[in-house]
Each structure stands twice: as C-alpha cells, then as structure tokens.
Image: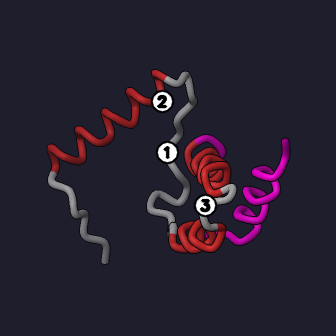
C-alpha cells in the first residue's frame, strides 16, 4: 500500500507551490489520471536518453501527465512523447 513520505504541511506546501508555478507559467494544471501514476517507465526512458534530448522528453512527459492527463506508464504515451520531442 502507498505511504505518503510527506507530512501534511509539506504536502500542502508542495501542492501550493505547483499551483503557483502553473499560474506563473500560464499553464493549465489538471490532476493526473491515474492519481498516482507509475513513473518508473518514464524515468527509465529518460535515463536511457542520456543528456541528449532529455529535457525535451521530460517536458513532453510533464505535459502528458499534468495537461493531457495521460497515463505516463503506458508505452504508447511514452512513444508519443519521444516522437514529439524530436520535432523542431
């Protein structure tokens, strides 16, 4: 079962900070679906990419998770992120 490593006040501060950053960058922010996605496949893909294009991939994964509400553990979603990061 999931055990949140953050205390209640730290979790509240983190969420407030995420909302402030979204407002600052004028970026829509929607809760992820599923609520606690398995990020290991995306993390492993980012590691395999190394430093070349890694920032673009991470940005695409961020958008997929927080804006498009996609499941970032889905290999098709990660393939789309890889494809989009390669566009000029």
60 or 8: which is nearer to us?
60
**Quarter of the image that includes the N terminus:** bottom left
Question: What percent of the width, then of the height, locates residue 64?
Answer: 64, 50
**63 over 44 or under it: above or below:** above
Mark 2 or mark 3, which is nearer the start of the sequence?
Answer: 2
Q: Residue at x 73, y 56 (%)?
A: 81
Question: What percent of the width, then of the height, locates residue 6?
Answer: 20, 56
Residue beneath label 1, please?
A: 31
Judged left or right of residue 38, residue 14 is left
The local crowd at label 3, few if under 14, some if 14 to 19, many if 20 or more residues have their Cα within 10 Å, is: few
Judged left or right of residue 59, residue 79 is right
Residue beneath label 2, please?
A: 22
Residue beneath label 3, please?
A: 51
**88 over 49 or under it: above or below:** above
Q: Secondary structure at mark 3?
A: loop
- Residue 15: image tag: none
Q: Residue at x 69, y 55 (%)?
A: 53
Q: Which residues are magenta?
A: 67-88
Question: What percent of the width, then of the height, locates residue 11?
Answer: 24, 47
Distance from disc 3 to disc 2, alpha carbons, whole Å, reads 25 Å
- Do labels 1 and 3 touch, CB within 8 Å? no
Mark 3 or mark 1, which is nearer the start of the sequence?
Answer: 1
The local crowd at label 2, few if under 14, some if 14 to 19, many if 20 or more residues have their Cα within 10 Å, is: some
Q: Residue at x 16, y 49 (%)?
A: 8
* Numbered circles on residues, count: 3
Distance from disc 2 to disc 1, alpha carbons, whole Å, reads 12 Å
The mark closer to the camera, 3 or 2, is 3
Q: Residue furthest front?
A: 51
């Amino acid at each position: 079962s999931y055990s949140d490593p953050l205390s209640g006040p730290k979790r509240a501060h983190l969420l407030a900070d995420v909302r402030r950053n979204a407002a600052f960058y004028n970026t829509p922010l929607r809760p992820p679906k599923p609520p606690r996605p398995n990020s290991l496949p995306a993390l492993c893909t980012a590691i395999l990419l190394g430093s070349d294009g890694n920032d673009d991939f991470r940005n695409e994964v961020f958008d997929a998770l927080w804006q498009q509400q996609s499941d970032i553990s889905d290999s098709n979603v990660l393939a789309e992120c890889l494809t989009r990061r390669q566009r000029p």
